[in-house]
Image (cartoon, grey):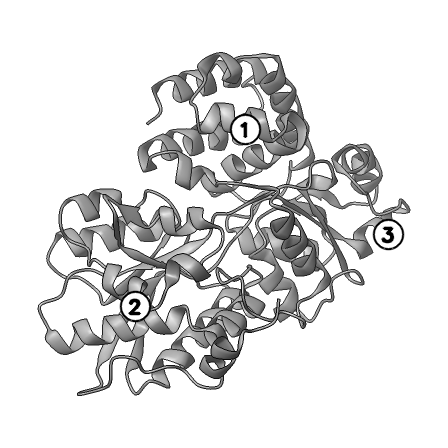
Amino acid sequence: MKLRSLAGALAATVALPFGLAQATDLEVTHWWTSGGEAAAVAELAKAFDATGNKWVDGAIAGSGGTARPIMISRITGGDPMGATQFNHGRQAEELVEAGLMRDLTDVATRENWKEIVKPASLLDSCTIEGKIYCAPVNIHSWQWLWLSNAAFKQAGVPVPKNWDEFVAAGPALEKAGIIPLAVGGQPWQAAGAFDVLMVAIAGKDVFEQVFAKKDEEVAAGAEIAKVFKAADDARRLSKGTNVQDWNQATNLVITGKAGGQIMGDWAQGEFQVAGQKAGVDYTCLPGLGVNEVISTGGDAFYFPLLEDEEKSKAQEVLASTLLNPKTQVAFNLKKGSLPVRGDVDLATANDCMKKGLEILAKGNVIQGTDQLLSADSQKQKEDLFSEFFANPSMTPEDAQKRFAEIIAAAD
């Protein structure tokens, strides 16, 4: 994936397509606050500052579930920021429908986003009634099992090659005083782990029947029952994690206190900051080593409507900068995610990122549940799996019944 000549020219410097009559400060809100995330977002800030404008960082500690209500409240309350992060999907849908978000169609058309953004579903998630309302910045996949090579060495068992081997290694890890599976207390972590198990165990078609087609019968059926059995295994293996944030759980793997973690590829940023090397210090299993499929979720920036003309101009510059080839490479190498541009050179990517690129190139992809479910349906799913992982008395059968009800009512 080499840069085309035009893209190469763009990569030499951050393009300034709109001119800078008066450079200005622009507040950008996001929830990237872990070590790896902070290193990645600094690349975006550096690229925007190079245009003569200034990135005013509005990081909100906690997860997206904590940050999004604050962001939405500011926008609806008349105190909008210059730009704000949301995940690919439907999280900003109501804000757009209320006329509070800026239409970026002119920028996207001028810079040919429909040709350079791959897969097309990313830009589709930004599009409402034919107009483009966000700038996608990365592809984040949930479908990974991260393993501590040191933990398995200490336990005296080989590093697993798939989920079944991981489950089988659980007793040896526990005997060595190591938590087999690290799962933090944030609700989205448990829900995300279940989604990953569904693709790995039931397969891509079943995943899409449940989340894309909202098929209640499939959600209540035998294939999903197998997934709940695996989720029950995961719940048992994660007992004793006792951390809240996802990056705290990742740190347990980094330090060898936990054998593994089901987490998106943003975990790579934490391994990188810790100085660990893929294939040497840790192992990554896409699709849990069972079904090598990745989801094309991730992050995009939306731009609230502003009355200030200079800040509005700066919004256009930022939107352009986010998709600049140079910015795409610098940011995604630090973030652990894949670029949304299909024409950039990632020769310096680590082994795990290269695995993701290979899967993406083969087209073995699914949309993330943020793209397939409304924010309300996602919240119901998160609440269910948060309770399931925290409450051993909830049986897999009872949890599956509630899950099918959520899918039946999902929009």
Q: Is residue 208 left or right of residue 101?
A: right
Residue density around tag 1, few if under 14, some if 14–19, many if 20 or more, within 10 Å: many
* CA gap, disc 3 and disc 1: 36 Å
Q: Residue 153, image x and y in percent?
A: 87, 52
Q: Mark 2 highlights which residue?
A: 110
How many labels were placed on the picture?
3
Image quarter hosting the C terminus: top left
In this rendering, which labeled residue sits more in front, label 3 or label 2?
A: 2
Residue type at mark 3: give it.
Gln
Find out whether the residues at labels 3 and 1 contact each other: C-beta distance under 8 Å: no
Q: Residue at x 63, y 56 (%)?
A: 357
**What is the distance, in whole Å, between disc 3 and disc 2 at their CAs?**
56 Å
Residue at image point 74% right, 41% down = 289
Tag 2 or tag 3, which sits nearer the N-term?
2
**Is disc 3 surrounded by few (<14), some (14 to 19) or many (20+) residues within 10 Å?**
some
Name the residue tied to disc 3: 154
Q: Amino acid at mark 2?
A: Arg
